[in-house]
Amino acid sequence: MERKRKRTAVDWAVDSVLYIAFGLFTIACIFPFYYIFINTISDNNLVTTGRITLIPIGLHLENYKNVLKLNTIPPAAFVSLARTIIGTVFIVFVASFPAYAFTRPEYWHRKFWYRFVVITMYFSAGIIPIFLTYKTLHIYNTFLVYILPGVVTPFNLILCKTYIESLPQSLEESAEIDGAGYMQRYLKIILPLSKPILATIAVFSAVGQWNNFMDTVLYIRDKSLFTLQYVLYQYLNQANAIAEIMREDPTAMAQHGLSTLLTPLTVQYTICIVTILPVLLIYPFFQRFFVKGIMIGAVKG
Amino acid sequence: MKRDKKNNLLPRRTNAREKAGFRLFLLTTPILIGVFIFSYVPLLGWIYAFFDYKPGIPVFESQFVKLKWFLMPFNNSVLRDQFLRVMKNTLGINVLYLLAMMLPMIFAVLLMEIRSVKYRKFIQTFTTIPNFISWVLAYSAFFSLLSNEGLINNLLQQWGVLKTPINFLADTSHMWLKMLGYHLWKGLGWGAIIYISAISSIDAEVYEAADIDGAGRLAKIKHVTIPFLIPTFFVLLVLQIGNIVNNGIDQYMVFSNAMNQDYIEVLDLYVYNNGLKLGNISYATAIGMWKSVISLVMVFGANKISKKVRGSSIF
């Protein structure tokens, strides 16, 4: 339909402005990460003196080797990975099973229990009461605090329920007539059919789990339970912490020449890239789910 | 249950259905108990706001002080100043966010004006990335550009514009605007997606009809696209108004430092700092309750207004 009209000078001007403005914003969105990345693989002397601007100079991967040798990083990466995998599996199961149950009209006092769950979206006891509750429940300062509180998310439940309701009913009915119990029907019919919505929820939960750092700030004191996000946060905040780690782990300093020596700045940059990488790696995969997920999300509960 | 009985002519079958329904309920009880423990039980913690609680002493052995902590921000002049400053920050930043709510819509409308589908997809892909990155990482990114040793200071010094570096992250001028800037960098592309999917669902015939009527680009945007997006915009606006006292805590915590603390300490951060850093559990709980009450009132108020003004509510 655009071909019908002749493009005027104004059209050209507007288009060029749009192309350039969007281009600049897009660059602004990715450039910081590119900049951090080239700093991690460049000569550390040049990085410290601020000579690296657009292209990496003096390529090397020593920073990555050294950072992985720091005694804080591998355990933190393990905790981050564990909470992401375990948390996501739980969230997906716990969103889908009750969602299925709530679609069944014979569910005992269905309306009441559905509201009982959904209404929790609109209130929260607040940071302090929650903190004290976790202490009383003895999940404070344990790995469980990463998994249990986030397991039931009413929003995911609503998404799932809306989706299951849109599935053809006849399939489940025929299974019911064949004598299949709830669990069988859920596992054999509902789960396979709701793959798209489950994938959406899984991807968003995984990113959420990986990125969450407030729960470590609030509920974790034990160093062995720190996540990558939190370790990075510490590095950003406490230049001292870095000096300390250098003291703790002098081998990293002694073994290498000056150009690959860890500096506070390069440590921080390298951890940043290590932390960001998993998200960027699954990004192309989950980008497909965006629009679908959002459109389902726009359907109100 | 009663309705089921009325509609069903076979009482026996109803009984079986009821039993099945109860069995299904039992299957979900662990989850319901989980909801109860993690969403309802913490509400009991509100009693801490009514006592002079000191960590270590059981709450019921502490002194019952009625509403002392709730009235604290009104009675004690030091706390009043703090509270007013925090409220000013909270509302100030949120009002800026409210004003900026049109931007994702404008972003989407303008993006759809880009003819090359490839370029459009490219922009969409890369402007959504920051949304999937934690605030800690976002802060890292800004740190690499804006800190004393950051790229911008380095370049400005090399070019001789600056003699001494400016630490943009500690510098307190335009703090709220900067927070808005970071917020937009992270969320603008993502926020536009919902409008983009709405625009692509507009019937092509409507645009063709507009073409035949001789509508230009601007006229089509003004008379077709924008009116179509307004309902979505209002739903999001109502939700955002309901959240006027909720900022979340991540962004403000990672960006706060000794210098800018006074300008970006929002309610959530204030509660955290008072309760968990300074140990004023009772006071922090009371402030948290004030916050919960205000936001509940705001959510339902905004919803009511939307019902009156537009005839539709969001829940």
Image (cartoon, rainbow, N blue to C red):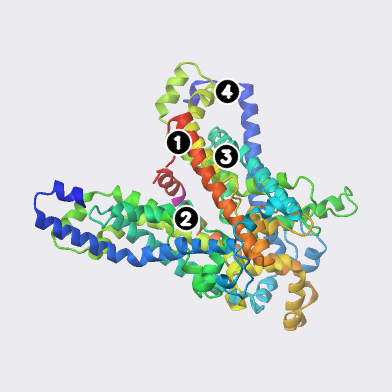
| Residue that label 1 marks | B200
Dots 1 and 4: beta carbons under 8 Å? no
How far apart are the alpha carbons under marks 2 and 3? 21 Å
Q: Is B38 located above or below residue B205 in the figure?
A: below
Q: Are marks 4 and 2 on the same chain?
A: yes
Label 4 packing within 10 angstroms: few (<14), some (14-19), many (20+): few
Q: What amino acid is labelled 1 in the image?
A: Ser
Inter-mark Cα distance, 4 to 2: 38 Å
SS for callout 3: helix
The stretch of residues the image draws in magenta is A284-290
x then y, percent, for residue B99: 63, 37
Q: Amino acid at mark 2?
A: Phe
Quick check: B101 left or right of A100? right
Mark 4 secondary-structure assignment = loop
Q: Which residue is mark 3?
A: B104
Task: Tell me the distance, in whole angstroms, between the alpha carbons under discs 1 and 4.
Answer: 23 Å
- What residue would you read off at disc 4? A7
> Is residue B24 magenta-colored?
no
Task: Give the mark, 3 or 1, whose residue is nearer the N terminus.
Answer: 3
Q: Which quarter of the figure is the C terminus of chain B placed in?
A: top left
- Residue bearing mark 2: A286
Who's the residue at 41% across and 62% down the image? B35
Q: Residues within 10 Å of mark 2 (few under 14, many from 20)?
A: some
**Mark 2 vs 3: CB contact within 8 A:** no
CA gap, disc 3 and disc 4 = 27 Å
Question: Looking at the image, which residue is at 67% across and 67% down?
Answer: B279
Task: Determine whether label 3 and label 1 are within 8 Å by CB.
Answer: no
Q: Is residue A286 magenta?
A: yes
Residue A188 position within the rendered picture, expressed as x and y whole percent measured from the top left = 25, 62
